[in-house]
Amino acid sequence: MTIIDWVKGDHSSLSIPTHAQALREGGVDFLNKAFHNSGFLSTNNQITKIIQLEECFGGSTGQKLLLSLEYAFPEAQLHTKLFVKFSRDFNDSIRDRAKNQLAPEVKLALLSQMKGFPIAVPSCAFADYHEASGSGILITERIAFAQGNIEPLYEKCLDYTLPQPLEHYCAIITALGRLAGTQKSGSLSEGIAKHFPFIPEQQAINQPIRYSPEQLQRRLSRISEFAARYPKLLAENIRQADFFKQCSLDIPQLLLREKAIKKYLNENTDFIALIHWNANIDNAWFWRDKESTLQCGLMDWGSVSQMNVAMALWGALSAAELSLWNDHLDELLALFASEYQKAGGPQLAPAELKFQMCLAVAMLGLAWLMDAPAMILAEIPQLNAETDRFDPLFEQHESARTQLQMLNTFLNLWQSQDFASFLNRFIAD
């Protein structure tokens, strides 16, 4: 892989570093140019010293750094502790393949600088991207988790440790509705369609289910065997033989109508809006305002675009506990519809939102979750009949934990909402 050190950014026209070492070499000189260019730093102020420039690890894309700065003059809202994300990772070809995910995230960060942006996102100090090489850099405030009035970072699929989960998910859903509705109102920017186009073929929902009916039936049998062998890992209502028989009947019908369902999910523009596609609990931060109301900010906007909002709601709720789904789904969907309309979006019927969500989850689950047992066992081969999902093994293995929780969520929705009834309604309509 050819390493490119600096490229000319498409947005600022500055030369921008493409990796950590280049940023180190550019140092204070580059950062002053960048921050003055973005307006993050006033022209009569400057960075005098880099206190910290330390690589941190995590995520599935490019290099990331913790950056701390000293300024000549302290200013209100001038963050000293920052987070740097590059699109590239020249040391890891697999991670580097995801370099294009930063392009829309940079555009979202630049859009968030507009006055009156409707939700909280990490304050952008500088963002730029070079489309031709897939090289980009994003510098934002570093969220101070567990400091002051900001709550700790909550890990994905550990919601059984989350205090007041409904309140937290209401905060997330409120933020999603406000952003999507504001975009639909037309008050964000005239360039939304250009910078965040809705391209159906690029949506996750439109990736083909790569299995034949026979292959899916074999995978369903393996899930049934997994449930019998490890009874404490899957919810009781989805371990029943009758449920797996119903799934076996539903699968051919869902596959037969795959293209028609996906067309349906793409054609109603009232449901297509700019929204975070993966607003899980670990991509949010929380604090209470003066009235003690829980507020929420959203981060990690990679691949942000316009998309079907029902699918984005699945993305936000997919790692939640089943009790939240079983007891509060209608409430959360109604909340989104209310916030969406209040912010300027069209009126959405919560029942139609649920209908579209269940159709989307059926498609996504068949495409991406039917191999979950094999993936879980590959990561944690020492499972036994007494292991439950609260075992410390799952706390230590995020991928296995995520696969398990999302499999539970997918199958629970299939059983509790009766996908067959949604399919019958789709056929009838």
Image (cartoon, rainbow, N blue to C red):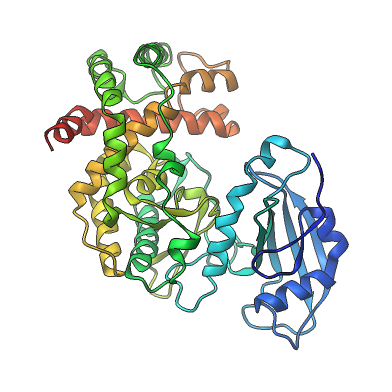
Q: Residue furthest left?
A: 428
Q: Quadrant of the N terminus?
A: top right
Q: Nearer the viewer, residue 30 or 154?
A: 30
> How many numbered discs, if any?
0
**What is the quadrant of residue 93 in the picture?**
top right
Q: Examine the rendered structure and indicate whether residue 160 appears above or below residue 19.
A: above
Rendered location of residue 240, percent (x, y): 27, 16
Q: Residue furthest bottom?
A: 44
Give the residue drawn at x 36%, y 71%.
186
Give the residue drawn at x 38%, y 49%.
165
Question: In this rendering, does residue 296 appear at all?
Answer: no
Give the residue drawn at x 84%, y 66%.
27
Q: Examine the rendered structure and indicate whether residue 186 appears above or below residue 265.
A: below
Question: In this rendering, does residue 271 appear at all?
Answer: yes
Rendered location of residue 166, percent (x, y): 34, 51
**What is the quadrant of residue 294 in the picture?**
bottom left
Q: Examine the rendered structure and indicate whether residue 42 appears above or below residue 94.
A: below
81 vs 294, left or right, is: right
**What is the quadrant of residue 425 in the picture?**
top left
Rendered location of residue 336, percent (x, y): 29, 57
Q: Quadrant of the C terminus?
A: top left
Give the residue drawn at x 45%, y 51%.
279
Q: Nearer the viewer, residue 353 or 201?
A: 201
Rendered location of residue 410, percent (x, y): 35, 31
Q: Residue furthest right?
A: 25
Q: Examine the rendered structure and indicate whether residue 291 appears above or below residue 234.
A: below
